[in-house]
Image (cartoon, rainbow, N blue to C red):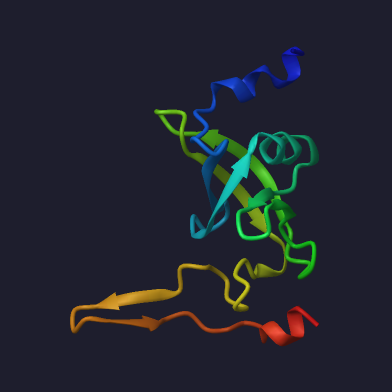
Amino acid sequence: MSTSTRWLNEVKWDEHGLVPVIAQEASSGDVLMFAWMNREALQRTAETGEAIYWSRSRRKLWHKGEESGHVQKVLDIRIDCDNDVVLLRIEQVGGIACHTGRHSCFFQKYFADGRWEAVEPVLKDPQEIYK
């Protein structure tokens, strides 16, 4: 194995060969999304400087923004103290990370009366994004 990929062995991959990934906007500190990566996705992310995830539903690599144009430029790749969670500090192109057209996928807030409510606006209609 080449030295250039040895760092991937430090990651604690789950039983499916995946690791959870948090995408955090570097400029604001906002957590924009959560996704999964396999070894190839993490390696390609490091090589290209853009976020590439593993889509569990489609069972294939997914270059974030390949359809929407809302790519994530990776500024920093970090791993937690247990080596089992990856943090990407990113620049979100277009300001939209969520397929619902919002800045963040974490737009629903819990209220004490037992309900969830969307508290962030739709910045662009998803039908316009995914024509």
Extreme-left residue of the structure = 113
Examine the rendered structure and indicate whether residue 113 appears above or below residue 85: below
Identify the residue at horizontal 63%, vertical 25% (top origin): 8
Identify the residue at horizontal 66%, vertical 43% (top origin): 75
Identify the residue at horizontal 70%, vertical 41% (top origin): 41
Identify the residue at horizontal 58%, vertical 76% (top origin): 102
The image quadrant that residue 39 belongs to is top right
Examine the rendered structure and indicate whether residue 14 appears above or below residue 121: above
Rendering coords of residue 86 (x, y %):
52, 39
Question: Which quadrant of the rendered structure holds the N terminus?
Answer: top right
In front of the other: 27 or 21 = 21
Examine the rendered structure and indicate whether residue 4 appears above or below residue 101: above
The image quadrant that residue 82 belongs to is top left
Numbered marks: total: 0
Rendering coords of residue 124 (x, y %):
67, 83
Along the horizontal axis of the image, is 40 left or right of 88? Answer: right
In front of the other: 74 or 82 = 82
Rendering coords of residue 121 (x, y %):
52, 84
Question: Which quadrant of the rendered structure holds the C terminus?
Answer: bottom right
Rendering coords of residue 2 (x, y %):
77, 13
Examine the rendered structure and indicate whether residue 123 appears above or below residue 54: below
